[in-house]
Amino acid sequence: MKDYKEIIAKILVDENIGLEYEEIKNTIETPPDKNMGDYAFPCFKLAKIKRNAPNKIAEEIADSIKKNENIEKIISTGPYLNFFVDKTLLAKNIIEEVKSKGEMYGSSDIGKGKNVVVEFSSTNIAKPFHIGHIRSTVIGNAINKIYKFCGYNTTAVNYIGDYGTQFGMMISAYKLWGDDEKINANPIKELLKLYVDYNTLAKEDPEKMDEARRWFSELENENPEAVELWKWFKEVSLSELDRVYNMLGVEFDSYNGEAFSSQFVDDIIKELREKDLLVKSEGAEIIDLEDENLPNMIVIKSDGSSTYITRDIATAIYRKKEYEFEKNIYVVGSQQILHFNQLIVTLKKMGYDWAEECIHVPFGMVSLKDQTLSTRKGQVVFLEDVLNKAVEKTLAIINERNPGLDDKEEVAKKVGIGAVIFQELFSNRIKDYVFDWDNTLNYDGETGPYVQYTIARANSIVNKANLSSDEVDYSLLSGEVEFDLLKTLYDFPQRVLEAMEKYEPSYITRQLIEIASAFNKFYNSCPILNADDKTMNARLALTDATRTVLKTGLALLGIQSPEKM
Ligand code: ARG
């Protein structure tokens, strides 16, 4: 795709204005008002070089400048040069490019030959997959797809929490109250109950906590009974998790979690000792991070067991060796900012110059406006219940709006689950947000269903049309609404890059809303199927390009688009 900033920078270089190409390119702005053109170049920097007032310089350049086919007109407005792009050529460039690249429009090869690890979801086994976990899963899944789209070779890792004292608690609890039948029938909920009840018990009777710790030690020492129970807890939990991942359309390349990393812990401790980084403190061994203004961290507890951070140190080193990553991205909530700071600082202290390639991508919390999904205790909302409810509510909406639709159930799944994902990815990830059903499912709001509906509308137009020829007269797309829509399509690849660089899928989410609303304006003011043949052809070409880009964008977010809605 032609980059207009590059075209304009080149024109100005040829004009010998006294600045280098790169500097010119970086100075080009987008004017606040459409009447001032599509791009503007402020002439303030030239005042010194040319020893003249910026207004005068702008005027002179506008008079003398050589035209370029891509630029329709260049004028001066005060100290600015304003550039108006050629609308017909823009339409031709974009539509032909989308047509030839299809759903790869906006992709690039910036990441070619580079490896990136994207860790996300990372749920704790035997604790519920609740609405809070959806954030990491959905944001991470989108980041993984966006990196792939930019040419990176990515590895999606689910660093499952399958280790630690809580497993000692589960084993103790199971030995007290365990009921195999119940657990097999409803693993996550039953295991959670064991865990919660045991916690309550241990608060009254500290002896019980000691017993749990003993069982975790047994697990670390590979006591067969402990290992067998742990494996079983893990198996039943994972298969239940998989059901949710399937609903969300999320896949991982690796499920290597904390237990996997624990095998490297002894070596890590040895390394830390050799590098003189361990300090004894009240029976435990810690790393002192005072010089970094960070709290100390416990590496080995007084009972000899390893900790969460020790396993993370081991994990990072393992990943560097295994994947030779350029970036090791952790999509984990903002409560763990301190943890990842400590991790990165420790890796640096150990002498690993790649520590800076470990990137924590934090996000804010989600709370629920409608609390009806809470359990009696009011804390845990199961993600699967939320997704099922989204599908159910969507089906009700479809039955009202379009009861004769084929495959209603399938469409309701794509739309309902897509709506939840879109909502998750709509705001800056770091913001806390309130999940609200009405906003999420509103067909006319800034939502997934709105974008999907726009695609379905475009599909129906393209399918109904009787095209007499493929030839498109692009000059018929130079009106203002068409141009506004074309510009949103033009911006799409740039938004993808920004989303990649900033680990921020919301750049794409928001651009999709821009595109969909520009399309709906176009649709409302430019009749398509009733226009004369030539106009119809041109408008159909634009409609076709729009639906392709919208679909691509949704796919990058992990959302499917139904053919009809
Ligand atoms: N399992 C952890 C939790 O749910 C998140 C793991 C984050 N990733 C990591 N490498 N520490 O809190």
Image: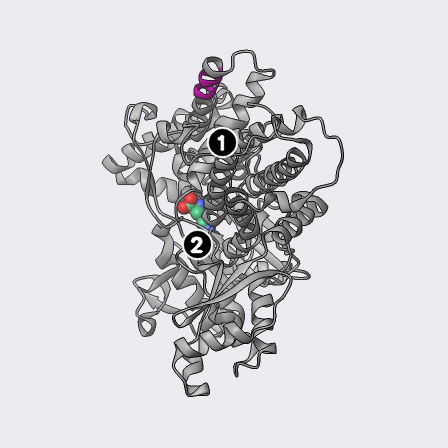
Q: Distance between the residues labelled 1 and 2?
A: 21 Å
Q: Which element carries disc 1, helix, strand or loop?
A: helix
Q: What residue type is labelled 1?
A: Asn
Residue 552 seen from this side:
yes
Identify which residue, 485 or 194, lies in the foreground: 485
Please name the residue that numbered disc 1 is placed on: 524
Residue at 28%, 33% in the rendered image: 200
Q: Where's residue 458, x and y in %?
A: 59, 31
Identify which residue, 547 or 279, lies in the foreground: 547
On the rendered image, what quadrant is the N terminus found in?
Answer: bottom right
Tally the numbered discs.
Answer: 2
Q: Where's residue 169, x and y in %?
A: 39, 37
Please name the residue that numbered disc 2 is placed on: 34
On the rendered image, what quadrant is the C terminus found in?
Answer: top right
Kindly give the residue lying farthest to the front in the view shown: 63
Graded by Cα atoms within 10 Å as few (under 14), some (14 to 19) or many (20 or more), the crowding at tag 1 reads few
Q: Where's residue 347, x and y in %?
A: 47, 67
Graded by Cα atoms within 10 Å as few (under 14), some (14 to 19) or many (20 or more), the crowding at tag 2 reads few
Residue 164 seen from this side:
no
Residue interval drawn in magenta:
392-398
- On residue 335, the disc is none
Residue at 45%, 74% in the rendered image: 58
Let me know if residue 331 is in the magenta part: no
Residue at 29%, 40% in the rendered image: 207
Does ligand 1 reach within 8 Å of label 1's beta carbon? no
Q: What residue type is labelled 2?
A: Lys
Residue 497 in the image: above or below residue 204 = below
